[in-house]
Image: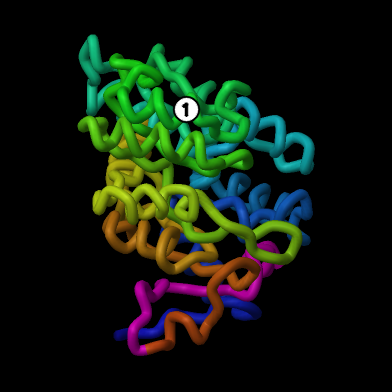
Amino acid sequence: MAQPKYLTGDVAAINEFIDKFDVFLFDCDGVLWSGDHVFEGVVETLELLRSRGKKTVFVTNNSTKSRPEYKKKFEGLGIPADEDEIFGSAYSSAIYISRILKLAPPKNKVFVVGEGGIEQELTTENIPFIGGTDPSFRRDVTVEDFNGLADGSLLDPEVGCVLVGLDWHINYLKLSHAYQYLRRGAVFLATNVDSTFPMNNNFFPGAGSISVPLVHMTGQEPVALGKPSQAMMDAIEGKFHLDRARTCMVGDRLNTDIKFGIEGRLGGTLAVLTGVNKKEDWEAADAVAVPSFYVDKLSDLRAAAQ
């Protein structure tokens, strides 16, 4: 398998790389920032690409924030971005449910295991839901809960789908409700199945760690709507009318970002070494994906301005 071209420090190669593409899809966590720390030179790098007529799109698997909330985060970190440039897994999930799954009454409600970002995007698509940030689900389980879940009296008969994302308040009660709905035939969806996510120069459990117990209990794998799901790529292509051959995916994770670009038949993929995966990961014999190019950090592309 061909190894990626190393661009850092090679001005001619960086300019050639940039000229190959019209659209750059950027992962956020581990590429632009870690937690609330923006990597050095990110703003200037984005400005450089835009000044050369490139379209920038921010594709994130983080489902805890809606697009408006993500725009606020960008603004707070000093990164210029339009809401229309942001494409998150919560939004992707809402689009999938409303326009592809098309749940019909009386089974058109979604049980959410996740945060407010999912709820806001479902609301935008006029999708009814329960669970999520509802305080009544953020408590210890009781004997009455066991009885009501067992006989079904605590379950909403209109739930036809369980959507699982990153949930800061995951507990036994939420998992028990989700499990019972899945046992009764609800469609199993996940905003993404990332095992971890980078924050504060470390790693923490990702959305995939929330859905794994349900996979173990039911034997079902969820339909994932974040990277590397090609349902997400199709939605991005439809929204931005991009030419895949002139589009590059930029990310730090091989099993999500780089795989997303490769399986989506994009013109190229660029790995940055500021997040999850390192050079030895794609050099391994069992590498899940190998990027086309790589740099030490995103700001290395600024050498093109020299």
Residue occupying image coordinates x 30% and y 38%: 188
Residue occupying image coordinates x 63% and y 34%: 70
Mark 1 surroundings: few (<14), some (14-19) or many (≥20) residues within 10 A: some
Instruction: Describe residue 144's horizontal placement relative to residue 233 as left or right.
Output: right
- Vertical position of residue 154 compared to residue 235: above or below: above
Instruction: Describe residue 266's horizontal placement relative to residue 9 as left or right.
Output: left
- Vertical position of residue 249 compared to residue 290: above or below: above
- Tell me the SS state at disc 1: helix
Nearer to us in this view, 10 or 194: 194
Say how the picture is coloured.
rainbow
Residue occupying image coordinates x 60% and y 35%: 140
- Vertical position of residue 280 compared to residue 249: above or below: below
Residue 120 location, x and y as percent? 53, 21
Q: Quadrant of residue 9?
A: bottom right
In magenta stretch: residue 296: yes
**Bounds of the magenta span?**
285-306
Quickly name the residue at label 1: 145
Residue occupying image coordinates x 28% and y 59%: 263
Nearer to us in this view, 87 or 306: 87
In magenta stretch: residue 281: no
Nearer to us in this view, 246 or 172: 172
Residue 111 location, x and y as percent? 40, 26
Q: What is the three-letter code of the residue carrying label 1?
A: Asp
- Vertical position of residue 49 compared to residue 241: above or below: below
